[in-house]
Amino acid sequence: MEEGYGYLLIAMASILWGTLGVLGEMAFQYAITPTLLIMLRLCISSFTLFFPIFIFKRELLKINRHDIFFFTIFGLFPIALQRVAYFYAVDFTTATVAAMLFYTYPAIVAAMSVFFFKKTITKKTVLAIILTFLGASFTVKIYETSSLIVNLHGILFGLLSSALFAVYVAMVKRLRNDYSSWTLVFYGDGIGAIALTSVVGFSRPEVTTFPVQLWLLIFTIAWIPSLLGYFLYSHALKYVEASRGSVVSIIEPVSAGVLSVIVLAETLESFQVLGIVLALIGISLLFYRPDKR
């Protein structure tokens, strides 16, 4: 029962994460830039966390002095830059393509482990990496040269987002040994918000003219797929092993694709659908660990 509850929470978190691209595309219709959108999202999420942590569990705000530099890098690159890159991928391509490119990160992690850390590679891993990148290639319509050139910036941003998330996974593994998930979210989002504020500070007059609809989208992105999605996933790991639970999280790109078709009226060609299926099979193979029991 507990394991089933954990899988249900991961599925819910993945569906929420799948709304990010759709909400982002809706926000871009109001001419907000991805950098400004992410800056506001990080400010809202970090401020939202600060008050309950400060009031109820102030010890979560403490970090070791020798980890300050590590936290700074964590907030700048795998948090701020990764989020910005993802939303630029959404802006230049579509929510579905961006989600699929982002979800190549398990294949990137596997490939990095082989080339940089000299880990042994199995036939299953090789097949999984091939299927993942072949599927991603079909999803971005590599078979149409003109479309590929037009969407090149979005594809590069999508792959950058994926690579930076692979760095995020590695850094979280290191930091989780000493810190709570909420400490990581608060400082990661807070440092990212400070860094991006210095970049888009000249946009402050623009922010005061945002319509109510755009502010609703911004707060929804900050609170629902971001904070709530992360909370559900973190809570689920109490009941499910991360490696096995990650298989369920491949619902995210499926959720993004379905919502894009329903909400944004996106259309997918047959080869793109095939690509999504191939990539999901590859990702599942990378995550899957047979139960030895």
Image (cartoon, rainbow, N blue to C red):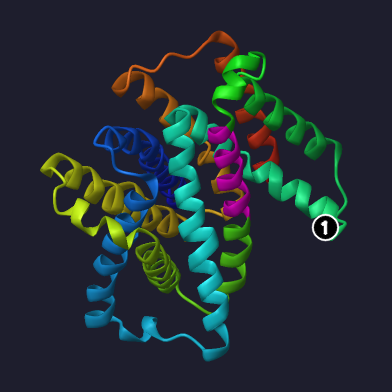
- Which residue is pictured at 19% across the width and 56% down the height? 205
- The image position of residue 250, as x and y in percent, is 53, 37
**Between 154 and 256, the one nearer to me in the picture:** 154
Q: Main secondary structure of the magenta part?
A: helix
Q: Where residue 66 sits: x, y (%)? A: 58, 88
**Would residue 290 be seen by someone viewing this image from the given angle?**
no
Q: Position of residue 142 (x, y in %)?
A: 66, 20
Q: Is residue 30 magenta?
A: no
Front-lying residue, 127 or 24: 24
Q: Amino acid at mark 1?
A: Phe
Compared to residue 69, the image places residue 244 above or below, namely: above
Look at mark 1 in the image and give the residue it sits on. Answer: 116
The answer to whether residue 24 is above or below residue 209 is above
Instruction: In the rendered view, tell whether residue 95 sits above or below residue 52.
Output: above
Name the quadrant containing residue 101: top right
The local crowd at label 1, few if under 14, some if 14 to 19, many if 20 or more residues have their Cα within 10 Å, is few
Query: Which of the 4 image quadrants contains residue 190?
Result: bottom left
Q: Which residue ends up furthest to the left in the rendered image?
A: 212
- The percent position of residue 177, horizontal first and vertical second, equals 58, 76
Which range is magenta? 153-166
